[in-house]
Image (tube, helix red, strand yellow):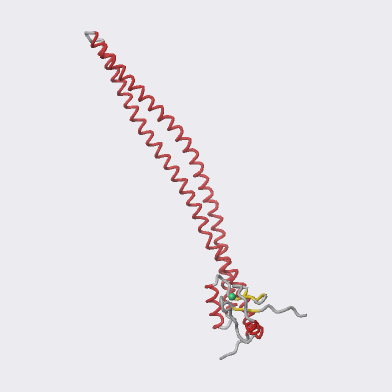
Amino acid sequence: MQKINVEEQIGHLKNLQAIDSDIFRLRRERAAKPKLIEDLEARRNDEQAAVRGIEEKIKANQVKRKQRELDLQAKEDGVRKLQAQLYQLKTNKEYTTMQQEIEGQKADRSRIEDDILVLMEEADALNKELAKEKALFADAEKHLNEDRKVVEGEISSLDSRISGLESQRAGSAALVDKKVLAHYEKVLSGRDGTAIVAVKDNACQGCFMNLPPQMINEIKMNEKVITCDSCARILYIEKEPDA
Ligand SMILES: [Zn+2]
């Protein structure tokens, strides 16, 4: 088996990790972008639904009012007809009965007029609400269109930075021993983008478990690649600056 230069491999892995950390960070940023547009679309759709809801209410109000206006017309015609008959009546009793009938019809008519007034007030309120809601909808649509452009620009910039890093990565990965690289990549995807970490104060800086002194010595010896027992990340010790 070909012996690898561990110190050199660790150096290559640290370079690779620096690139991979950037790639992971940018990918996370990239992954969050579509949600921003979805939220803006959801707000726009909510406002649009609110506008339609009020428009439906206005339509129902108009239908009701038209019906009440027809009722009113019929009532007025009825009153007029009864009033015309009044003069053809022969007896006082017939006259009194007819007048009572006319008063009853007039009372109905004024109830219908009240209904129409209520419907008109309701229409005024609905029209005000509609104007307010339409302004909110226009604002939501404006935000969506503006921010969508911004976010799409950010996405394409992130995509090109990621693809630049990926080609840089391919060059760095080619320098790493295949077996070591396979382990590194397995840990990288399983451990949120960090596969090689320094040891500080005798602890793995990936999972912060304390490492036994023997393991620290093995890392210092640079004879083989040492991995953390608990998180499987590759370990290295930063060289002390020359005294
Ligand atoms: Zn660890």
Instruction: Give percent across and percent down for residue 78.
Output: 28, 20
How many numbered circles does the render carry? 0
Instruction: Give percent across and percent down for residue 159.
Output: 55, 65
Task: Name the quadrant of the N terminus.
Answer: bottom right
Residue at 29 percent of width and 15 percent of height: 100
Q: Toward which corner of the image does residue 58 lie, by quadrant? A: top left
Q: Quadrant of ligand 1?
A: bottom right
Q: Toward which corner of the image does residue 118 lie, by quadrant? A: top left
Residue furthest to the right: 243
Residue at 37 percent of width and 36 percent of height: 60
User: Can you say whether 59 is above or below 33 in the image?
Assistant: above
* Front residue of 169 and 14: 14
Residue at 51 percent of width and 47 percent of height: 140
Task: Name the quadrant of the C terminus.
Answer: bottom right
Instruction: Describe residue 183's horizontal placement relative to residue 64 as left or right.
Output: right
Instruction: Describe residue 206's horizontal placement relative to residue 107 as left or right.
Output: right
Instruction: Give percent across and percent down for residue 230.
Output: 56, 76
Q: Toward which corner of the image does residue 231 lie, by quadrant? A: bottom right
Instruction: Give percent across and percent down for residue 208.
Output: 61, 73
Instruction: Describe residue 220's horizontal placement relative to residue 194 as left or right.
Output: right
User: Can you say whether 144 is above or below 21 in the image?
Assistant: above
Instruction: Describe residue 96's horizontal placement relative to residue 211 as left or right.
Output: left
Residue furthest to the top: 91
Residue furthest to the bottom: 1
